[in-house]
Amino acid sequence: MIFRVIVMIGERILGKPFSEDGPRADMFLPVWLLAMGMALVALGAGALIVSLIIPPSVAAIIVAAAGLAMVLFGAAALLCWRNQTIVMLSEDEFEYTTFLGSKRVYRFDDITHMRVKQDSLTLFVRGDKVHIESSAIMSRRLITRLDIALGDEEEDTGEDFEDSLRQSKEDGSEAYEPPEE
């Protein structure tokens, strides 16, 4: 019973992790990030309570600092899971939401290049950066559209985009540049 109440409160504040209608966006972060954020917040709150109960000492200060750090990291994980998304508005435009909730609309034609690192990839769009974590879940239509925007004009299944990501991670290269036109 208490677990259901906690889940209801969490869904009210953060939104539902799944929808019966399909994915909540064309790019979103996995549910394990939500679980990790909630666990860190709970552990951090517990550590803060323990630091208030134990007698004042260096140990109490260390426990309080660790608890505060866990709460802050957990809150950041919750914000990332809740906010960091890409939603395709049409075949030509997408809306990127940062982890703080700031929304921007971009055109796929404005993507100049992509930088791939081990933990993430960055799309450079009109002088801005669109950051995508490596753990993010992306729809096939977004992958296909990014593949086309980065220079592969053929209609395909997005395998070239995925291959370029995989290859750049394997050979250590940091950027994928679209071919010259």
Image (spheres, helix red, strand yellow):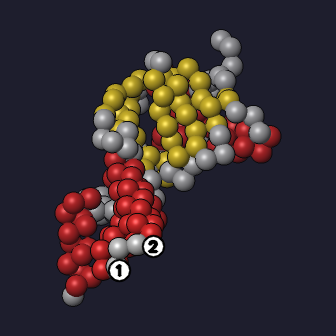
Q: Is residue 8 visible?
A: yes
Placement of the N terminus among the 4 image quadrants: bottom left
Q: On the picture, is 180 further left or further right than 52?
A: right
Q: Of 33 and 68, which appears nearest the observer?
A: 68
C-alpha span from label 1 to label 2: 9 Å
The relative height of residue 36 versus residue 4 in the rendered view (above or below) is above
Query: Which structural element holds mark 2?
Result: helix
Q: On the picture, is 47 further left or further right than 9?
A: right
- Type of amino acid at the residue the image marks with label 2: Ala
Mark 1 lies on residue: 54
Q: Looking at the picture, how far across and down is residue 88, in whole percent?
A: 38, 37
Q: Residue at x 27, y 82 (%)?
A: 3
Placement of the C terminus among the 4 image quadrants: top right
- Type of amino acid at the residue the image marks with label 1: Ile
Image marks 1 and 2: residues in contact by CB distance under 8 Å: yes
Q: Residue at x 45, y 23 (%)?
A: 128
Q: Is residue 37 visible?
A: no
10 Å crowding of disc 2: few (<14), some (14-19), many (20+): few
Q: Of 115 and 45, which appears nearest the observer?
A: 45
Q: Looking at the picture, how far across and down is residue 90, in whole percent?
A: 36, 32
Mark 2 lies on residue: 59
Query: Which structural element holds mark 1?
Result: loop
> How many numbered circles are shown?
2
Q: Residue at x 39, y 25 (%)?
A: 106
